[in-house]
């Protein structure tokens, strides 16, 4: 897949997620029935991110009647815009109220370090911190680059193993296990497979 095709794919994924978000806003008065519920791949017992063995990172209440799956690339500028602009009102009205849970699937569309960041997200999810690490990854690249209009980082190495471990230092409780998970690239193949 060419670089242009990857960018277009990431943009289409973001547009699809935005379309679902618009549906939420327009249809917020509608009652969600059991037949509208989208099945998740596993259940959780708390509001933290579920472990990666279940193949998903859940943001929100596990008992929410509706699950929306977002496929995103941490280096995608449109995904970052969705995180900053679209997700907060949706989170406030639907996720924080327990109506919807968001399942996040990290992709490696833009560059190799996109997959590394996604794999690190699963490493954090192993310790119940996938949602928090997801937010930290988007904030890190957003605050330093995308929110300032600087997209030059998109095709440069940004998410190094050292940076990924440092980012987890205030989030993930067991740093040696987290670091080993990143070093061994435990979930990199999973991200690559989800991307393809």
Image: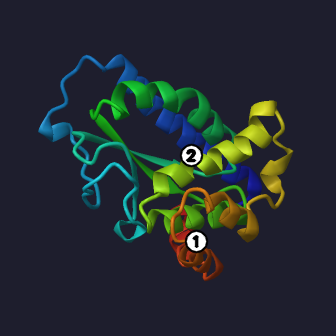
Give the image location of residue 79, x and y in percent.
61, 41
Compare residues 124 and 30 and report the one nearer the observer: 124
The residue at the point 70 percent across, 47 percent down is: 140
Residue for badge 2: 135
Compare residues 124 and 58 and report the one nearer the observer: 124
Give the image location of residue 133, x and y in percent.
55, 54
The residue at the point 50 percent across, 32 percent down is: 87
Residue for badge 1: 175
Q: Is residue 50 left or right of residue 175?
A: left
> What crowding class fits label 1: few (fewer than 14 Cα within 10 Å), some (14-19), or many (20 or more)?
some
Q: Secondary structure at mark 1?
A: helix
Give the image location of residue 137, x and y in percent.
63, 51
> What crowding class fits label 2: few (fewer than 14 Cα within 10 Å), some (14-19), or many (20 or more)?
some
The residue at the point 84 percent across, 57 percent down is: 156
Q: Is residue 26 left or right of residue 72?
A: left
- Identify whether 99 is placed above or below 130: above
């Amino acid at each position: 897949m060419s670089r242009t095709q990857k960018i277009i794919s990431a943009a289409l994924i973001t547009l699809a997620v935005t379309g679902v978000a618009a549906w939420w806003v327009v249809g917020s008065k509608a009652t969600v029935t059991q037949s509208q519920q989208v099945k998740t791949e596993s259940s959780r017992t708390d509001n933290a991110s579920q472990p990666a063995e279940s193949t998903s990172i859940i943001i929100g209440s596990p008992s929410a009647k509706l699950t929306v799956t977002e496929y995103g690339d941490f280096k995608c500028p449109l995904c970052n815009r969705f995180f900053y602009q679209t997700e907060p009102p949706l989170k406030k009205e639907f996720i924080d109220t327990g109506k919807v849970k968001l399942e996040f699937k990290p992709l490696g569309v833009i560059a190799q370090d996109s997959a590394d960041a996604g794999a690190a997200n699963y490493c954090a999810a192993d310790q119940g911190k996938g949602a928090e690490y997801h937010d930290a990854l988007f904030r890190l690249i957003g605050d330093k680059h995308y929110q300032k209009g600087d997209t030059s980082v998109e095709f440069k190495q940004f998410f190094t193993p050292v940076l990924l471990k440092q980012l987890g230092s205030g989030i993930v409780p067991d740093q040696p296990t987290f670091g080993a998970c990143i070093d061994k690239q435990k979930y990199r193949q999973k991200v690559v497979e989800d991307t393809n």
